């Protein structure tokens, strides 16, 4: 039996990341790969420590595969390297002070490394990504309409989509469906194609660093298609769930 450990949302919380790494080491199941689906940095001063910890695993630790997330995209925007010119989303969500905080927390050297990272990973029949196949800020949740979930899966032909943008741990099953596409011209709408989807899933992998004292990540067995959500309590009164 082999497993993937899939996590997202460390957000510069080094204590939370260390707790997850320790839990992975103590798994009775063999963990073959670790995937970090973005948001490993944040506006915390420890963001640089998290990056160095990820990039330089200790002896006998796995080297994580890392892709970019929402926080990394905001950081690239601050340095004039993003898809937009202004950190509008960052300011709207966290206020103008977050711009300086993020700038101060992440070095230019780290920014260059972030630039080299992938947008996501496609392994076997699984898409592992921070947001979705549409964008890094596309937030999928248990309340997302089925047609939207189906669209995000079919864009990449994935049977399982692992995502971390919402910070929630959930399993969303689609029993099947169809997506109809049309092209609108001056002459009216013209049907292009109809795509039918087989049963598929969207899995929210949880969040490691947002809630103090509590980290959530996901274990996935690609041989059996089994998903397990892990909740780690760290600090005072620590435990496992």
Image (tube, rainbow, N blue to C red):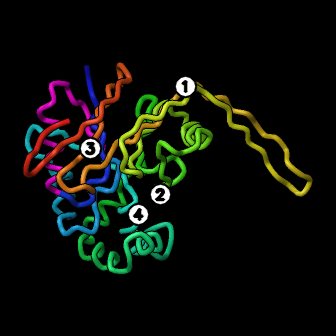
Residue receiving disc 4: 73
Distance between mark 3 and mark 4 Cα atoms:
22 Å
Answer whether residue 22 is magenta in the image.
Answer: yes
Distance between mark 3 and mark 2 Cα atoms:
20 Å
Mark 4 or mark 2: whose residue is earlier in sequence: 4
Image quadrant holding the C terminus, namely top left
Using a 10 Å C-alpha cutoff, classify the residue at mark 2 as few (fewer than 14 neighbours), some (14 to 19) or many (20 or more).
some
- The picture places residue 179, in percent across and down from the top left corner, at 68, 37
Q: Which residue is drawn at 42% across and 46% down?
A: 129
Residue receiving disc 3: 216
Q: Which of marks 3 and 4 is in front?
A: 3
Give, as a single range, the part of the protein colored magenta. Answer: 14-35
Above/below status of 60 relative to 213: above
Residue receiving disc 2: 137
CB within 8 Å, label 4 to label 2: yes
Label 1 SS: loop
Extreme residue in the right direction: 187
Image quadrant holding the N terminus, namely top left
Mark 3 or mark 2: whose residue is earlier in sequence: 2
Q: Residue at x 67, y 32 (%)?
A: 178
Residue receiving disc 1: 199
User: Does 2 sit left or right of 76 as displayed?
Assistant: left
Q: Nearer the viewer, mark 1 or mark 4?
A: 1
């Amino acid at each position: 039996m082999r497993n993937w450990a899939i996590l997202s949302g460390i957000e510069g919380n080094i204590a939370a990341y260390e707790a997850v790494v320790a839990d992975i080491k103590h798994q009775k199941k063999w963990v073959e790969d670790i995937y970090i689906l973005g948001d490993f940095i944040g506006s915390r001063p420890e963001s640089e420590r998290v990056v160095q910890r990820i990039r330089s695993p200790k002896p006998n630790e796995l080297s994580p595969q890392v892709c970019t997330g929402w926080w990394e995209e905001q950081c690239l925007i601050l340095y004039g390297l993003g898809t937009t010119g202004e950190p509008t989303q960052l300011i709207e969500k966290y206020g103008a002070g977050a711009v300086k905080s993020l700038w101060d927390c992440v070095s230019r050297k780290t920014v260059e490394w972030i630039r080299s990272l992938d947008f996501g990973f496609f392994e076997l029949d699984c898409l592992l990504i921070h947001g979705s196949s549409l964008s890094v800020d596309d937030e999928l949740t248990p309340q997302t309409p089925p047609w939207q979930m189906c669209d995000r899966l079919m864009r990449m032909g994935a049977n399982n989509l692992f995502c971390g943008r919402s910070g929630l741990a959930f399993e969303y099953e689609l029993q099947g469906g169809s997506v109809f596409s049309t092209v609108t011209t001056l002459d009216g709408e013209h049907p292009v194609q109809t795509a039918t989807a087989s049963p598929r899933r969207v899995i929210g992998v949880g969040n490691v660093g947002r809630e103090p004292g509590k980290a959530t990540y996901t274990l996935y067995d690609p041989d059996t298609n089994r998903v397990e959500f892990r909740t780690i309590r760290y600090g005072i009164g620590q435990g496992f769930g």
